[in-house]
Image (tube, rainbow, N blue to C red):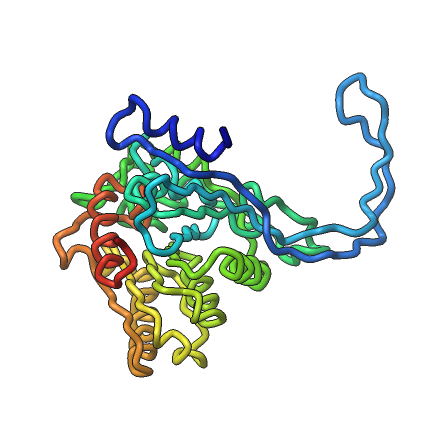
Amino acid sequence: MNRILLIGLVGLVGCAPDHIALRDMGSFHIGGRKVEVSGKPVKDLVFTPGGVPTTVDLNGTYLVESMYVQYFLPAKRRGTVPLLMWHGGGLTGVTYETKPDGGEGWLTWFLKRGWDVYNSDAVERGRSGWAMYPDIFTTDPVFMPMAGPWDRFRFGPGAESYAAHATYPGMQFPVDGYDNFLRQNVPRWTSTDAPTIAAYTALVDRVCPCVILVHSQAGQFGYRVAQARPEKVKALIAVEPSGIGDAQQTARLAGIPVLVLYGDFIEPDARWATIRRNNLAFADAVNKEGGKVEVVDLPKVGIRGNSHMIMMDRNSGAVAEYIQAWLARQGLFQ
């Protein structure tokens, strides 16, 4: 009996109705390039206490800027194309896995409903690995202290709110899981956009046609990859995108349905109010070219209290239902 059938049987025999049944799962790395590094000193290092010294020569050829992808394929597929999940800045694919408070993440939510799901760690993040800087990554990594996300991701009003753990009224992020959220934060670089877009484009070339779901920093990646491969992207869902696509190529998005979602507490935050205005202007430019960009402020459709980390909020299931219904209207779910 082959492995795929065994995976399906494990999910189908004697389990709860919502148990995940898979026809396959796995992972791969994609993209990257070779780089020559020279001029580094040669050293003898002891890696383990009491071990034998090893000569370490950092000069040579490196394969860098590849991306890690993990996939889960349900036994009963209902999404007509795969769903690709791309995370935001300073984060990894863990964004879509189990939520910081232990609740169900979007990866398993959509998987249970019959979507082939591909979840990535972008270039430089998580299991995609680092490269030397400034030789390859030309800028220093950027780190975020514990207080950073509280204000930046709209859990509370202003930087000073972290000390008191003061939140916006009705805010849905599970603050009891805040430290768990911090544990998944990783450094980011400001000089890796081009290789990240290249890796995501390679992923689209490999597994698409598809739907792409992006968050925050990945907004610009989703737009730009869709502009590069409009025939392969059947829909784009942008969850609080912090960036836009190529303003000179808006017509290339005209044939792609796009859903842009924003959470709550936008207007009191000058930074996010500006980000949203910039994205609205980009959406308007696409729609003037005949595009189909729909911008939804979740409070206006009755889904309230969302932070920037919408997929981790307590009401993330309601947002997932909204996305699912929208995808069904695009004819992408059967």
Residue 33 in percent (x, y) is at 69, 57
Q: Residue at x 41, y 43 (%)?
A: 73
Judge whether 34 appears above or below 126 on screen. Answer: below
Residue 43 x %, y %:
86, 37
Query: Which image quadrant for residue 193?
Result: bottom right
The image shows residue 174 at horizontal and vertical percentages of 27, 36
Residue positioned most to the front: 1
- Judge left or right: residue 280 versus residue 116: left
Residue placed at 33% from the left, 59% from the top? 237
Image side of residue 59 versus residue 225, left or right: right
For this view, does 264 lie left or right of residue 43? left
Q: Is residue 48 visible?
A: yes
Q: How many marks?
A: 0
Q: From what the image shows, is residue 192 above or below residue 70? A: below
Q: Quadrant of residue 314?
A: top left
Q: Is residue 160 visible?
A: no
Name which residue lies at 34% across and 36% down: 99
> In the image, is residue 236 above or below residue 56?
below
The image shows residue 118 at horizontal and vertical percentages of: 44, 48
User: Residue lying farthest top?
Assistant: 50
